[in-house]
Image: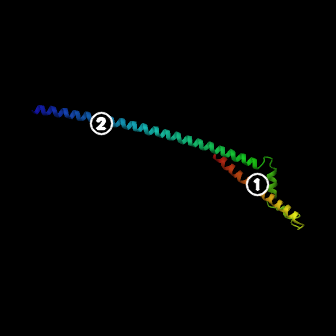
Amino acid sequence: MLILGGAIWKRRAAQLAAEQRRDALIAARVAEANAAIEAAKARVAEAAAKEAAAKAEAAAKIEAAKLAAAAAKAHPADGSGTAVADASGGHHHGHHGKGAKGKGKGGDAVAAKGSSSSDEKKSAAKGGRDNAAIDKLLAQFK
């Protein structure tokens, strides 16, 4: 009876050891699979981030090109428009015309026309400075 009890005990201990080894092997494989899944998720997220960055960079380049085209359209490349705008920016030449001396209603229209054109020149000059600052900032990001 003692021998039979000892044999059963040994067999049961061997079964428990085999179950523990099997459970440890399953846990290790599950951990490896989870690590592989997490690594794949990280690679996908990294690829998505790179793609989003590339799209943002392309959009920024397109926007910069649009701004440059708008600036070129608003301010011709010959430079004469900006020089006149800068030179007359602080002066109001329309006040010394016929309207300023009080010679009738026609002179007032001329004076009003002169002052509006100088306002347009001021806004054009101001717009030119803003576009240059924007272009400088965009160049820093490249």
Mark sitting on residue 23: 2
Residue 20 visible: yes
Residue 142 visible: no
Direction right: furthest residue? 103
The residue closer to the viewer here, 64 or 27, is 64
* In this picture, residue 141 sits left or right of residue 114: left
Direction front: furthest residue? 105
Residue 63's x, y, as percent? 66, 46
> Label 2 is placed on what type of residue?
Asp
Residue 86's x, y, as percent? 79, 56
The residue closer to the viewer here, 48 or 13, is 48
In the structure shown, which secondary structural element does the residue marked by tag 1 occupy? helix
Mark sitting on residue 32: none
**Label 1 sits on residue:** 124
Disc tally is: 2
Report the colour scheme: rainbow
> Label 1 is placed on what type of residue?
Ala
Q: Earlier in the sequence, mark 1 or mark 2?
A: 2
In the structure shown, which secondary structural element does the residue marked by tag 2 occupy? helix
Residue 49's x, y, as percent? 54, 42
Mark 1: few/some/many CA within 10 Å (<14, 14-19, 20+): some
The residue sitting at 80% across, 59% down in the picture is: 116
Quadrant for residue 19, please give it.
top left
